[in-house]
Structure formats: structure tokens, C-alpha cells
């Protein structure tokens, strides 16, 4: 007996989907998102620089968790139309024209929509093509198989949704275990800031709103509209002040705010206190940054080499 042919109305003879297919696709499409989001969060916080932020986005993740009952069904419907239902149609089309078990085509079919959306996304946003397509195909795989299973079993919509909700909890277990295992074994490489020599640090660094820092090889520095620590005893409650002036700089690996290498900037006059700019980015695309104020909600300033 075929993968789809147990339904009483034989919907597999049409290259479309039934309302029950949409319900099943949306149910598991949304149910798998907490596990997928957790894996993405583990990967992102491990491989990307948090710029000294306190909880690495954990507060945002907690807010999403609180609104999950409202968001997941909506996101499930979106993923159903974008990934799952096109995969179901492709699987039925392949099963009609090519030999092989129906389950096999349901496994392969999600690659089609993943390529359709992943290739332009990679081009437009600069995402790695292989990772993007593989991630989208993975998101479409389980819901595509789930649609076939639901049609075979003949579950009612209420039964589909409570089983999907239970599956959402079950999927979190391998997501946590897999994420921890990947980080501990080095499969996911932990981010490490680059080590820059004084010669690499010397030059012009620019940021938003006209901020500019010129570091000369002789240790002198010049700032234009550069944020710095407020002067000691400042009567105004400010996270930073914008300064224009000259001073000195030196490579600095010790700071009260961070344990990474950086630049200690000392501007002359009353242009703020000494400011430690930490090194971030990569060897090819270095950055200098400082986080003013509360680590969980402060103001982040990033400088990049001129022309970058």
C-alpha cells in the first residue's frame, strides 16, 4: 500500500493539498521551531561575539518563549506554505513519475523548496549557501513526513495538534543534548577575537554618526565625534559623551570591563575618561568596540577600519 493511498478520498491523485494537509504541516512546522531556535541560539552565541553583553540574548529568548503559544501557530502556517506543502506536492509528483517508495520521495522533496528560497537568500544576505539550504531542508523534512503519517493514520485535527505539541517538548531533549555535545567536542567552534599587533591597530577607524579614531604608530591619537567614558563626577546621567580632541593610545590587555585585548585611549583635556576599546571581528575584518552602560541593555559602539 502506498504512502498516500490509504486516505478514503485518494487525495494523492491531485497535485495539490487538502485542508487537513495544511493543518498537519502547520502543527509540526510550528512545533519544531523551539528546538530549531534553541540549536540556532547555541550556535550563534558560541560562534559569534556577544560584544560583552550580559546574557547573550537570553532575555530576548525568554520573551519569545512567553509569546510562543501565539507565535508558533502563525510561524507554522508560514513554514507550511513556504516549505512543507511544496515538498508534499513534489513528493507526490515524483512518486507518480518515478519508481521508489513514497517515504523516500518525502525525504528528498524538501531539498527543492530549500534551494528555491536558500539560493536567493544566500545571494542577497551573504549567507553561506550550503548551510542555508541544508537548514531550510531540515526545517521542511519532519513536517513533510508528518503530513504523510497523518494522512495514513487518519488523525483528526485536534489529535494532530496535541501530538505535535508533545513532539515539540520531545524534540527539545535531543536539541539540548546535540548542542552541548557539538560545543564540547569542538564541532561548533567557539568564537575567539583576533590578536592584533600594534602595527595592525594603527590606522583610521570609523563608526556611526561620524565617529572617527586615528591611531598613529608613534602612540598619538586623534578623535572626532568619538564616544568616551563620561568625565568623573559628571552631574548628568550619561552612558557616554562625544569628544573631539587628541591624546595617546596603547595596546591594552587589562581592563575592568573585559579580559580581551584592546586599545586604551587617553584623550587630553576634559574630553571624557580613559576608554578601553576591545578587539572583535576577525583577522581579515577586525573591529574595535565598547559597550557603555548596563551590560544587558547598554549602548554598543563599533569602529571598523576606514574603507572596510
Image (spheres, rainbow, N blue to C red):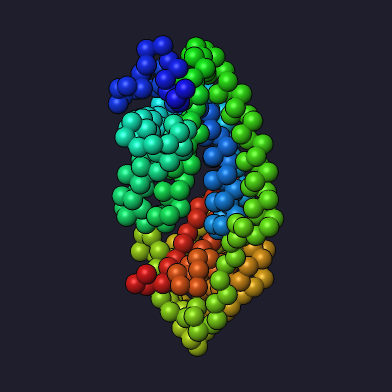
Total marks shown come to: 0
Foreground of the two, 123 or 149? 149
Locate residue 159: give its quadrant: top right
- Residue furthest bottom as drawn: 218
Viewer-closest of 245 and 69: 69
The answer, for residue 244, to whether it is visible in the render is no
- The percent coordinates of residue 94 (x first, y second) are 35, 35
What residue is drawn where x is 55% and y is 68%? 279
Vertical order, 93 against 222 (above or below): above
**On the rendered image, what quadrant is the C terminus found in?**
bottom left
| Residue name at image x 30 percent, y 22 percent | 14
Q: Is residue 238 above or below residue 161?
A: below
Q: Residue at x 67, y 71 (%)?
A: 254
In the image, is 251 to the left or to the right of 244? Answer: right
Q: Is residue 1 visible?
A: yes
Q: Nearer the viewer, residue 63 or 85?
A: 85
Q: Is 23 located above or below residue 75 in the figure? A: above
Could you say where residue 289 lies in the image, as x and y percent from the top left? 51, 63
Can you give x and y, in whole percent of width and height, for residue 129 in the image?
A: 39, 55
Q: Residue at image x 36%, y 22%?
A: 12
Measured from the top left, where is residue 79 in percent x and y?
41, 32
Amino acid at each position: 500500500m502506498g504512502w498516500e493511498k490509504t486516505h478514503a478520498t485518494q487525495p494523492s491523485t491531485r497535485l495539490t493539498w487538502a485542508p487537513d494537509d495544511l493543518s498537519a504541516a502547520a502543527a509540526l512546522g510550528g512545533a519544531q521551531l523551539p528546538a530549531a531556535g534553541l540549536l540556532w541560539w547555541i550556535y550563534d552565541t558560541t560562534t559569534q561575539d556577544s560584544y560583552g553583553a550580559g546574557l547573550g540574548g537570553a532575555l530576548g529568548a525568554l520573551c519569545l518563549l512567553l509569546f510562543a503559544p501565539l507565535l508558533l501557530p502563525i510561524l507554522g502556517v508560514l513554514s507550511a506554505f513556504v516549505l512543507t506543502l511544496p515538498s508534499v506536492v513534489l513528493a507526490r509528483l515524483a512518486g507518480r513519475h518515478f519508481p521508489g517508495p513514497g517515504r523516500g520521495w518525502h525525504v528528498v522533496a524538501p531539498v527543492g523548496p530549500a534551494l528555491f528560497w536558500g539560493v536567493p537568500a544566500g545571494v542577497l544576505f551573504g549567507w553561506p549557501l550550503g548551510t542555508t539550504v541544508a537548514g531550510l531542508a531540515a526545517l521542511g523534512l519532519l513536517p513533510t513526513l508528518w503530513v504523510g503519517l497523518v494522512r495514513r493514520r487518519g488523525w483528526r485535527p485536534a489529535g494532530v495538534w496535541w501530538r505535535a505539541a508533545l513532539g515539540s517538548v520531545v524534540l527539545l531533549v535531543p536539541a539540548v543534548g546535540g548542542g552541548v555535545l557539538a560545543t564540547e567536542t569542538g564541532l561548533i567552534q567557539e568564537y575567539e577575537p583576533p590578536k592584533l599587533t600594534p602595527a595592525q591597530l594603527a590606522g583610521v577607524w570609523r563608526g556611526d554618526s561620524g565617529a572617527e579614531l586615528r591611531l598613529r604608530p608613534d602612540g598619538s591619537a586623534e578623535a572626532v565625534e568619538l564616544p568616551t567614558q563620561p568625565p568623573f563626577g559628571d552631574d548628568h546621567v550619561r552612558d557616554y559623551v562625544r569628544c573631539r580632541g587628541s591624546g595617546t593610545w596603547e595596546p591594552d590587555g587589562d581592563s575592568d570591563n573585559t579580559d580581551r585585548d584592546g586599545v586604551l585611549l587617553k584623550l587630553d583635556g576634559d574630553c571624557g575618561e580613559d576608554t578601553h576599546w576591545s578587539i572583535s571581528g576577525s583577522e581579515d575584518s577586525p573591529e574595535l568596540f565598547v559597550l557603555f552602560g548596563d551590560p544587558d541593555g547598554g549602548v554598543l559602539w563599533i569602529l571598523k577600519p576606514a574603507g572596510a
